[in-house]
Image (cartoon, coloured by chain):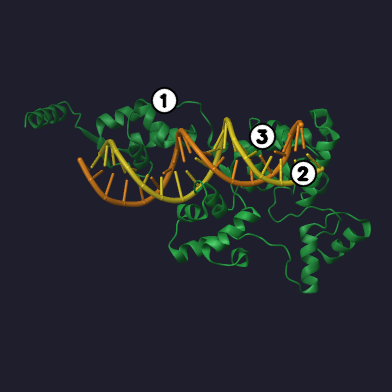
Chain colours: A green, B orange, C yellow
DNA sequence: TAGCATTCCCTGCAGATAAC
DNA sequence: GTTATCTGCAGGGAATGCTA
């Protein structure tokens, strides 16, 4: 009761001096949006820095200018200053295809994961470099770092970066198995085009390209040429491709979530299942078999 | 045997929602 | 209006399996 009287008294005083407890959220909302969009701060980071709740900062991203909010909360928000400014362009999400092709091209030259994890801006973290090939979006800063590293390395010799011949040959074999094209197969003006294909033969993507692959022994036959040859022959693809959509549909049919499947498969946690569902990782053959038996389907039911 | 590739474990972020 | 909690997911470090 006493607190209530004190609060009513304070509210009367605030009104009398022209500062009611609530004020339009517009100014605070614009400040939060500026900190988030222009300065690269996360909403939780803004909440911590201002001493408010994360849900408050999140709400302010969507309120209208005249929507009321508490003055003391708005003042905390307005006092918050940006940390480590990052431009909107730097934090924007972009298509990773061109960056992935550049990294693949450098592997095809014989550069190893540890070298590329340093030179392409992964802070030397090798697992993240290899995981990057499954990314569906990246930010513009990463794209620019990879482009800079590609420019530096595309005509370089891996030996100059401490890569011995044996390791370089192994990496070139890996690229070969995955049909990753070297820099010579890409043009700088088309490498970022999702529709572009690497030019191994001068006629890739056509039956003639497949013929040139065979004639000149350019191995492996690139995917566009193999597809063109299959289509010309009216054949279905022979390689197995795991389908995240098929897995998602099977889980939905059973009412299972990722943790349910991981528990039934005996995995330590749901992380791998999340990565299979998102397409960011492919299951090993053993995991694929186990997944199929756990779901009571054949491995073909999990193919694309 | 070295080191690459994959998986696991942990932490933190964002969205949704119930509770205060 | 604010806080607490849960879920899904991404990223970093470490461990382990695999291969040349």
Cα gap from disc 2 to disc 3, whole angstroms: 15 Å
Q: Label 2: state its secondary structure.
A: helix
Seen at 49% across and 49% down, the residue is: A270
Q: Label 3: state its secondary structure.
A: helix
Seen at 68% across and 62% down, the residue is: A240
In-image side of A273 versus A208 (left or right)? left
Q: Residues within 10 Å of mark 2 (few under 14, many from 20)?
A: many
Spot occupied by residue A173 in the image (x, y as percentages of width and height): 81, 46
For the residues beneath circles 2 and 3, the answer to whether they share a chain is yes
Q: Quadrant of the C terminus of chain A?
A: bottom right
Spot occupied by residue A152 in the image (x, y as percentages of width and height): 77, 32
> Front-most of A137 and A18?
A137
Residue that label 2 marks? A105
Q: Is residue A172 visible?
A: yes
Residue that label 1 marks? A81
In-image side of A180 versus A125 (left or right)? right
Q: Is residue A187 visible?
A: no
Residue that label 3 marks? A145
Cα gap from disc 3 to disc 1, whole angstroms: 28 Å
Which chain letter matches label 3? A
Q: Is residue A160 above or below residue A232?
A: above
Query: For residue A49, what is the image quadrant?
Result: top left
* Disc nearer the start of the sequence (3/1): 1
Q: Label 1: state its secondary structure.
A: loop
């Amino acid at each position: 009761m006493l607190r209530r009287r004190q609060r009513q008294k304070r509210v009367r005083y605030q009104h009398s001096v022209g500062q009611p407890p609530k004020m339009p959220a517009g100014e605070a909302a614009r400040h939060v949006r500026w900190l988030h969009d222009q300065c690269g701060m996360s909403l939780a980071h803004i909440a911590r820095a201002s001493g408010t709740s994360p849900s408050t900062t999140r709400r302010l991203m969507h309120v209208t200018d005249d929507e009321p909010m508490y003055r003391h909360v708005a003042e905390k928000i307005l006092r918050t200053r940006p940390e480590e400014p990052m431009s909107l362009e730097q934090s924007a999400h972009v298509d990773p295809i061109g960056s992935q092709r550049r990294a693949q091209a450098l592997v095809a030259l014989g550069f190893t994961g540890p070298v590329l994890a340093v030179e392409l801006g992964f802070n030397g973290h090798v697992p993240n470099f290899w995981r990057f090939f499954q990314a569906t979006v990246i930010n513009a800063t990463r794209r620019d770092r990879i482009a800079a590293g590609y420019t530096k390395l595309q005509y370089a010799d891996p030996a100059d970066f401490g890569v011995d011949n044996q390791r370089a040959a192994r990496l070139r074999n890996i690229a070969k198995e995955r049909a990753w094209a070297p820099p010579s197969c890409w043009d700088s003006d088309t490498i970022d085009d999702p529709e572009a294909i690497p030019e191994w033969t001068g006629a890739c993507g056509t039956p003639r390209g497949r013929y040139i692959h065979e004639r000149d022994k350019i191995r492996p036959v690139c995917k566009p040429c193999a597809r063109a040859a299959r289509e010309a022959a009216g054949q279905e693809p022979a390689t197995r491709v795991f389908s995240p959509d098929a897995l998602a549909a099977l889980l939905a049919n059973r009412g299972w979530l990722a943790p349910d499947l991981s528990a039934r498969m005996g995995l330590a946690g749901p992380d791998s299942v999340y990565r299979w569902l998102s397409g960011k990782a492919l299951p090993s053959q053993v995991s694929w078999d186990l997944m199929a038996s756990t779901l009571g389907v054949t491995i073909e039911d999990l193919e694309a």
